[in-house]
């Protein structure tokens, strides 16, 4: 009976250790919520996109100093996946709406992006989050 109890107790402890060990550090939810992301229309008489507009919110409890976004876009010729970094001091809960020169060098094919999310975040205290 004592051996059976010890075996059950050992298996329970092992299961608890494995359960906590299999959760990766990056599994924490993304601290940035993208509320809007689109490619800007070309200027008159141009076929090139006018850049990319990204609106987002810092949902963490700490001030963010940089956010790297991954933005996918497809036109008639290619499917692109590019990164852009926004640098500043972005306080928790404050809506941010910035324009970037991302995709201003390709033929415009509509506003819609195929993907748009924060892939890495740096906080004012030196800590960071990565997807």
Image (cartoon, grey):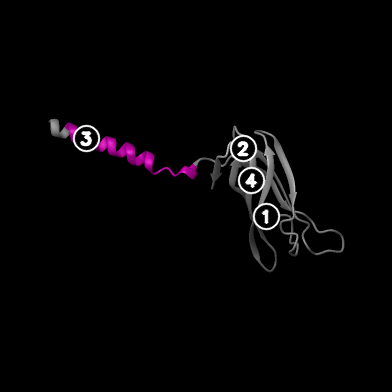
- Image: 68 above or below 43: above
Q: Are marks 1 and 3 in contact (CB under 8 Å)?
A: no
- Image: 6 above or below 72: above
Looking at the image, is mark 3 or mark 2 nearer the viewer?
Answer: 2
How far separated are the C-alphas under marks 4 and 1?
18 Å
Q: Are marks 4 and 1 in contact (CB under 8 Å)?
A: no
Residue of label 1: 113
Q: Furthest residue to the bottom?
A: 77
Q: Tell me what residue is drawn at x 71 percent, y 37 percent.
A: 95
Q: What element carries label 1?
A: loop
Upstream in sequence: badge 2 or badge 1: 1
The x and y percentages for residue 88 are 69, 42
How far separated are the C-alphas under marks 3 and 4?
47 Å
Is 105 placed left or right of 65 in the picture? right
In the rendered image, which quarter is residue 90 located in? top right
Q: In the drawing, what numbered circle is on residue 8?
A: 3
Q: In the drawing, what numbered circle is on residue 124?
A: 2
Upstream in sequence: badge 3 or badge 2: 3
Upstream in sequence: badge 4 or badge 1: 4
Q: What element carries label 4?
A: strand
Q: Are marks 3 and 4 in contact (CB under 8 Å)?
A: no
Report the front residue among 105 and 5. Answer: 105
Give the magenta part as a residue range: 5-27
Upstream in sequence: badge 2 or badge 4: 4
Which quadrant of the figure contains the N terminus? top left
Looking at the image, is mark 2 or mark 4 nearer the viewer?
Answer: 2
Badge 3 crowding class, 10 Å Cα cut-off, few under 14, some 14 to 19, many 20 or more, is few
Looking at the image, is mark 3 or mark 4 nearer the viewer?
Answer: 4
Is 124 placed left or right of 10 in the picture? right
Type of secondary structure dominating the magenta stretch: helix
Residue of label 4: 67
């Amino acid at each position: 009976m004592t051996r059976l109890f010890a075996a059950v107790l050992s298996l329970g402890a092992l299961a608890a250790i494995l359960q906590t060990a299999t959760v990766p550090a990056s599994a924490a939810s993304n601290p940035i919520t993208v509320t809007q992301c689109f490619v800007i229309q070309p200027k008159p008489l141009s076929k090139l996109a006018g850049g990319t507009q990204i609106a987002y919110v810092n949902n963490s409890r700490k001030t963010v100093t940089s956010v790297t976004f991954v933005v996918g876009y497809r036109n008639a010729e290619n499917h692109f996946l590019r990164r852009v970094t926004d640098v500043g001091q972005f306080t928790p809960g404050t809506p941010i709406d910035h324009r970037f020169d991302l995709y201003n060098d390709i033929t415009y094919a509509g506003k819609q992006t195929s993907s748009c999310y924060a892939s890495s975040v740096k906080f004012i205290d030196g800590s960071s989050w990565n997807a």
